[in-house]
Image (cartoon, rainbow, N blue to C red):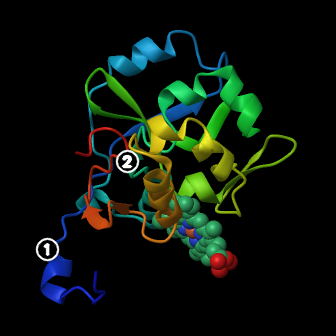
């Protein structure tokens, strides 16, 4: 494999990643009544439109949307994980005062399918303090290594652990590249580290 800068032509052809409307994720038993069913009824919706941003306040609000926007879906950490009370015991992830896990968002890209969104800025830069208040943009304290080590076969790939961990090792540097079988696979919108790679 050789490394080179991409051309400007290629760079400007990279499609803009859509940002879907997203919803808070809660620790088990802390979600509002009927939340899961309600989420399943939501329509997919994109929420970042430059043409609609007029005032400084609009831009600040949009900045928070971008900060919270996941780029992986049900990969590294899945919805099934955060619904499992044991995951919380084993990872030690702190929930905020309102029961939410501000590192993640639920995303509806297809109606009826609610995915856990990961690898947003918020995942690594949100700090839940000992009194369970939330600081956005801080040094984050989601326990990433314990979180990703939970069921790595399901969450980071099925083939074998060395491949899984190669993907894992690279995630922080180049978040949209996954190394698998020595090839670089680039999927700008949909990253699936799990079984849908074939
Ligand atoms: C997978 C985890 C992860 C994600 C996702 C992530 N960061 Fe970071 N970020 C880090 C880590 C770890 C560092 C510290 C790196 C170091 O000090 O070597 C860092 C450092 C930074 C710094 C430098 C802070 C300083 O004090 O110099 C900024 C700014 C930053 N990140 C912004 C962002 C933004 C904006 C996003 C989303 C677009 C983002 N990060 C997504 C993990 C992450």
Q: Report the residue at 22% width, 45% height from top.
A: 198
Point out the quarter of the image occupied by ligand 1: bottom right
Name above or below for residue 60 compared with residue 159.
Answer: below
Point out residue 117 in the picture as x, y percentages from the top left corner. Answer: 44, 42
Name above or below for residue 77 compared with residue 143.
Answer: above
Is residue 188 visible to us here? yes
Of circles 1 and 2, the one toward us is 2
Q: Report the residue at 28% width, 44% height from top.
A: 46
- Circle 1 SS class: helix
Which quarter of the rendering shows the N terminus?
bottom left
Whether label 2 lies within 8 Å of ligand 1 gets the answer no
Q: Badge 2, how many Cα within 10 Å: few under 14, some, many 20+?
A: many
Q: Report the residue at 28% width, 57% height from top.
A: 52
- Circle 2 SS class: loop
Point out residue 91 in the picture as x, y percentages from the top left corner. Answer: 72, 39
Counting the numbered discs, the total is 2
Q: Badge 1, how many Cα within 10 Å: few under 14, some, many 20+?
A: few
User: Which residue is label 2 attached to?
Assistant: 193
Is residue 57 visible to us here? no
Name above or below for residue 80 compared with residue 178.
Answer: above
User: Which residue is label 1 attached to?
Assistant: 13
Query: Relative to 110, is 10 on the left or the right?
Result: left
Which of the two residues, 178 or 103, is positioned nearer the viewer here? Answer: 178
Separation of marks 1 and 2 at Cα, in angstroms = 24 Å
| Quadrant position of residue 158 | top left
Whether label 1 lies within 8 Å of ligand 1 gets the answer no
| Quadrant position of residue 125 | bottom right
Most distant residue in the right direction: 130
Query: Relative to 113, is 56 on the left or the right?
Result: right
Point out residue 68 in the picture as x, y percentages from the top left corner. Answer: 49, 51
Earlier along the polypeptide chain: callout 1 or callout 2?
Answer: 1
């Amino acid at each position: 494999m050789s490394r080179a800068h991409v051309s400007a032509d290629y760079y400007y052809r990279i499609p803009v990643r859509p940002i879907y409307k997203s919803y808070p994720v809660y620790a088990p038993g802390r979600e509002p009544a009927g939340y899961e069913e309600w989420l399943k009824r939501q329509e997919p919706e994109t929420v970042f439109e430059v043409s609609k941003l007029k005032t400084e306040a609009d831009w600040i609000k949009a900045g928070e949307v971008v900060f919270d926007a996941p780029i992986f879906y049900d990969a590294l950490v899945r919805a099934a994980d955060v619904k499992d009370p044991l995951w919380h015991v084993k990872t030690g992830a702190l929930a905020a005062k309102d029961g939410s896990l501000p590192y993640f968002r639920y995303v509806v890209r297809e109606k009826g399918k609610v995915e856990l969104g990961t690898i947003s800025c918020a995942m690594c830069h949100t700090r839940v303090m000992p009194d369970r208040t939330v600081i956005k943009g801080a040094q984050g304290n989601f326990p990433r290594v314990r979180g990703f080590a939970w069921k790595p076969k399901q969450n980071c790939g099925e083939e074998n652990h060395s491949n899984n961990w190669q993907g894992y090792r690279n995630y922080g540097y180049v978040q949209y590249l996954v190394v698998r079988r020595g090839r670089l696979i680039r999927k700008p919108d949909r990253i699936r580290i799990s079984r849908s790679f074939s």
